[in-house]
Image (cartoon, rainbow, N blue to C red):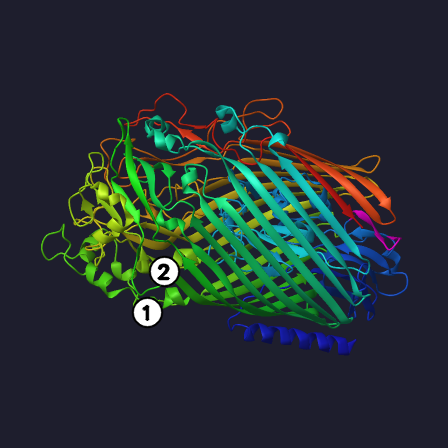
Amino acid sequence: MIIQSQKSKRLLASAIALAMASSVPAISWAQSSDATIRGQAAANVDVVAKNTATGASRRTHTDKDGSYALVGLPPGTYQVDAGPGTERTVTVTVASTFTLNLTAPAAAAATASPAEANAQNLGGVTVSATTLQEVKTSEVGQLVSLRQIETTPAASRNFLEFADSVPGMVFTRDANGNTSLRSGAQASSNINVYIDGVGQKNYVLPGGVTGQNNSQGNPFPQLAVAEYKVITSNYKAEYDQLSSAAITAETKSGTNEFHGDVFGSFTNTAMRAQTPAEQADGKKVDSKEKDYGFDFGGPLLKDKAHFFIAYEGKEFDSPITVTPAGNSALWPLLPQSAKDGIGPANLPFKENNWFGKVDWEPTDRDRIEVSGKYRDETAISGIGGASTANSALDTRNTDKRFDLRWDHSTDSWFNRLQATYEDAMYNPTPITTGYGAAYVDSNNQNGTLLTDGSSPLSYQNKGQKGPAISDDFTLNDVQWHGDHVIKMGVKFKSVKLTAQDAGDTNALYSYAVSPEGTESIPYQVQFGLPTPGTSPVATSRDKQFGTYIQDDWQVDDHWTFNLGVRWDYEETPSYLNYVTPADVVSAFNSQDPNAPAGQTYAQSLAKGGVNINDYISTGNNRSAKKNEIQPRLGFSNDLFGDEKHVIFGGWGRSYDRNLYESLQVEQTKSTLSQPTLMFNTPLEPCTPSATCLTWNPAYLSIPALQALVAGTKAGQEVDMVNNNLKSPYSDQMSIGMRNQIGDWNTSITFVNIKSHDGVVYTLGNRRPDGSFWADGSQPWSFGIPGFGSLIIGNSGLQTKTNQLLLSAEKPYTVDSHWSASFAYTYTNAVQNNDNNDPTDQYAFDYEKIGNYPYSAAPGVSKHRFVATGSMDGPWGFVFGSKLTLATPVPDLGVACPYVTPPPGVDSGFVNGGGCLNFAVRPPGEGRFLVGGKVFGYRDIDFQATKNFKIYGGLNAYVRIDLLNAFNWNNYVDFIETFGTNGVPTGKRQVIYNPTGDITGYPRTLKVTAGINF
């Protein structure tokens, strides 16, 4: 057909023109949760897909060669046909592309890769459907289905927990009950979660998504999640603001039938085993967990409009353990008042989580959705690890979002216009105000043994709010040497970022601990000092822009190419327009009091390799980066054209964002500073000065401390950020093969990921000769004249990860009654830092980040294996199980002193102070059932659900989850024992603390009951 061919060429030309025009700023996120069906049918006919649950329809028109593409399909079950004899009923899943050929002779058989056959009961009519499988994609990822969510044993109702079954992913519940999800060596901050196509990125705090920083709560009601897809690398160009994994979830919608659920689950002290700390203490701490909620949905106007609402509540009182850190030989020498805080404690928590959605399809070309969520949490946090109950925080966490979108489709194109508004705040405040104590290893001022109280930094008020608008346009009728589906999009977002980093109601005193005991007077104190007439809250109206174009090019039955590129741009005014205070600039240009006459402090810094002009901001010498171009290239080759054996691979770059809590320190440190004063003690001597005083008991008063520095800047830390700060990014490469062997879908993939330019803060102080090390000590007392220490921020954190990912999955079918999945991950990952917390961006153990050696990345096991299974039993029973095995993760840090005399310069794994930079994996604590003790994490969970039919469509169920059935202790705290002068003690240098915290749960029984209709 000449007309059709000319139309396609015009559309292709339009696509290229629009791509060129879209080089103006924008960022896109939409369409990441929709499905696409592509295939062959008769030439020049209509292809119609009708959702069997809602009546919603999508249509397109085949080309002269019979190819077609249906785009923008909400995941679900559809009746698809291209004329008589071609009808098919299929289920499509989230964020995936499928092949479905509708030629009449093949219509009776599955033309996509054989997949699970489902049966849905819709108003008394059973609809049999084939679930299509996505195999021709270059992305590395996997689907988490509603069946998996409902049948896999669950320790929490955080829907992200089930991503743990995807190779390369790790979901953790730490000893505080806080949950997080990470991929490879990168921190949880580097992921992004898209719900109904809307990115939930946290721009201020770690955690990856809003609300997940130091939270026991759930980012979204699990009842509202239909399914989601995890993409660990090589995602397409529409995914933005991440450098690690992308999780894209589809929420449930109302249908043409009314449906609802009510549930409640419960466990308490009597239904769990003792933690190791409780065993050592001889008694349990009271604890309980309650989850409850409901959902309800149905038609507002049959086939046209529907509603859905979900609520989940959560009440926890979780056990926690306080245990010292660092050199275990010093623990017995802590004062008794501090040791009284060691042992079991608990953490209360409460959450309310709401979601609602209304959809309307006024025509078979248009769909309008309005949705919103509201999450509210209160918690006691900050206890556990090396922090006693006196360090507790009263935390309030809220997260609100409102979304509106309009989809419009034609035979040849699809468009989505979407607007959203978000408002998320995190507000912890210290429960105990006034005096607090930190006990520190006298040989390592960076090595805190125990904290018994709150510092001024414990008070925070951080969040983000503002609107965004985006438009995404898809051409699904372009032919040129094959069939193309071309997507392109633009987005503008204006979000107000807020950060308050400290308060003035707390002071933290540091006491040195040596083999002779704990000094009776502190050697240091940090406290809050507000600057009159200024606000302690930093704000910035960020503007985010970006654009992308993505071409999914199906050359023939064998080759498919995924070719995309995106560009991101962000302006953060409080960083770009910041002006370094004149008195700070003057101090750099003043006489260095420790140097020969005429030598300024800036000259002392220059001798040490620090050009202070790289950090002094004039308000116009910083610029937002315009070079964040991100190619995303991938391919797949269906070897025999039957989707049973597919080779795939790809390479791509992805930029993340610098967290605002890292950028705002310049401003907040100057408006509400946290001066540090030193006291001359035998173990930590200092040269008498305005910031090195003789101890006086009167200094235990915060007003007295503030009076000492009133009218001066003495002891006030100055934080400065490099004027050429970059955005973190990762380069991702993968090659793999998918195979269908009988009912099993298997995959083997090699992945290489390198992340670059993470922001990191180091000590900027230098001695008059420019040296950093002297007699094994850092220049903490050689700060800015008239101020305190200089802390400088640069782009320098890096990780390198190689992974081998193996998976095998047998999907559930109603005929087989069972499903199973196996996921194995081998990881070799390193980073250039020695911090056990990958979200901590401070590195003080070496002169600069470039001097750090690469060592094993924290929290990453070399070997990890996860298996899940489900089975329909007799008499309405459904059974599920999950096995998780992982080798120990490394303990990172420095052992001081390890080499004497200290070398005075950083050299490999020994820093200039003679401290050993170590990353040591402790020996495994247990075997699986047989064999050696090789595992650091072991867990077997079971669940059994009994379904009851009450009357008509009203049903009930009772479910029992048995978590950690064998009561394996999965320790997370370490005991470190290092020798001195390079001579080991003969003991293992790092072992797990047998009375410390554990991750996950002790053996726990949880009971759930519910009603549905």
Q: Quadrant of residue 334?
A: top left
Residue at image location 19% in from the left, 34% down from the top: 682
- Given the current orientation, which residue lies at the most extreme left position? 597
Q: Is residue 265 above or below residue 245?
A: above
Q: Nearer the viewer, mark 2 or mark 1?
A: 2
**Magenta span has 119?**
yes
> Which class describes the residues within 10 Å of circle 1: few (<14), some (14-19), or many (20+)?
some
Image: magenta residue range: 114-126
Q: Where is residue 293? Give x, y as percent.
A: 68, 49
Q: Nearer the viewer, residue 327 or 755?
A: 327
Residue at image location 67% in from the left, 56% down from the top: 250
Residue at image location 55% in from the left, 57% down from the top: 399
- Tell me, for residue 110, which label it has, or none: none
SS for dot 2: loop
Q: Amino acid at mark 2?
A: Pro
| Magenta-drawn stretch, dominant element (helix, strand or loop) | strand
Q: Is residue 529 left or right of residue 728?
A: left
Q: Is residue 201 visible?
A: yes
Residue at image location 58% in from the left, 49% down from the top: 351
Q: Where is residue 511? Give x, y as percent.
A: 29, 37
The first of marks 2 and 1 along the sequence is 2
Q: Where is residue 771? Give x, y as percent.
A: 21, 46
* Residue under numbered circle 2: 536
* Residue under numbered circle 1: 619
- Given the current orientation, which residue lies at the most extreme right position? 84
